[in-house]
Image (spheres, grey):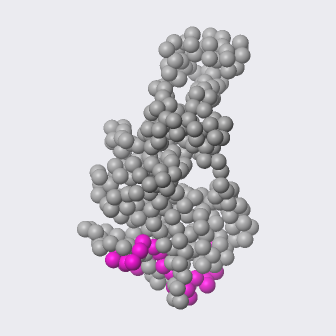
Amino acid sequence: MQGSDSVALRAPVTVSYARALVRAFGKTRGERDELLNGTGVQLALLEQPGAHMPVSALVALAANITRRNGELWPLSAAAVWSTSLQGALDVATRTAPTIADALTIGARFGSTRAPFIRNQLRKTARAIQIEISPTVAMDDALWRAVALAVGLNVHAVYVQLLEDAIGQATLQFPWPPPAGAERLAPHFSCAVQFDAAAFGFEVPKLLCARPSPFADPELHARAIEALQAVEKPRPDGEALARIVENLIAARLPQRLAEEEAARLLGTSRRTLVRRLAETGHAFRPLLDAVLRERARAMLASGTQSRDAMAAALGYTDATSFSRACRRWFGERGGRG
């Protein structure tokens, strides 16, 4: 795997996409477990508000869905591509002064919400286009499925911005029409072109000068600030530490070992140790912090016995759990 590929696969992405996909395609516990097979992520992580997972896990989930449902599966999960999952990116795009500004923002900040793609703004004499490409290696079927999902999301944004002129915009795919391409028609109000030069979304320049129907300078400025905060370079180890904590929490009551965490992140144990150490982290303190915060929450709720809490955190008995509580919270926290 190329070095840039490896970095992109380790990048953190919100679990919101994965949560929505698992709910859409996994109607039973067995189906959900099958969808998550090979991702390194368990259902418990998906239910944690604000949790993140590595891009590699989301790509593995998309690959599992593609194998089970074919490359047109995004059409069966339209709610996943709604603008509501885009957060500040949706707000910044819709409240931009003009359509051209919206395209510029989408090209600049699109990968903050979806780090598995990169965007490039291209301008010609007659149109402005966002050209989209993957940041990680995907086989052809998987990339076509992911591109369709991205296209549905782009359409959801610009059908609101362009209103009755959406039919003049074009979503372009650089491959022949897939089997069942007629199923796309109800989902797109814009033109859909296959066998194009690249994957992208193109808007005629005459439309780009239009003011956004949702233009709001104050709200726009706040959304841009939020996106810039996310875009701001952070120490890679900090993002890595957050992902490791999420993986540890998702595995409970089983204890995630350092070697297994490295494998799930597509790296070696030695490299994981080094990259965490670069920003002052280590695996064992991260594990301890996750156990401490989970214990704090369970003790505060007061609904479980010591034996049950010990089992939930992977301790062999209540005595070991109480000993850990004394270390974390003092003598009072360790009382049975």
Residue drawn 61% across the image and 69% down it: 105
x and y, in percent, of residue 310 in the image: 53, 18
- Name the image quarter holding the C terminus: top right
Image position of 216 (left or right of 166)? right
How many labels sit on residues?
0
Judge whether residue 195 is colored magenta: yes
Q: Reply above or below: 43 against 189.
A: above
Image position of 63 (left or right of 291)? left
Which residue is more in the foreground, 322 or 38?
A: 38
Q: Reply above or below: 146 against 56.
A: below
Q: Which residues are magenta?
A: 190-214
Judge whether residue 38 is colored magenta: no
x and y, in percent, of residue 306 in the image: 56, 15
Residue drawn 56% across the image and 13% down it: 320
Which residue is more in the foreground, 31 or 237?
A: 237
x and y, in percent, of residue 315 in the image: 52, 18
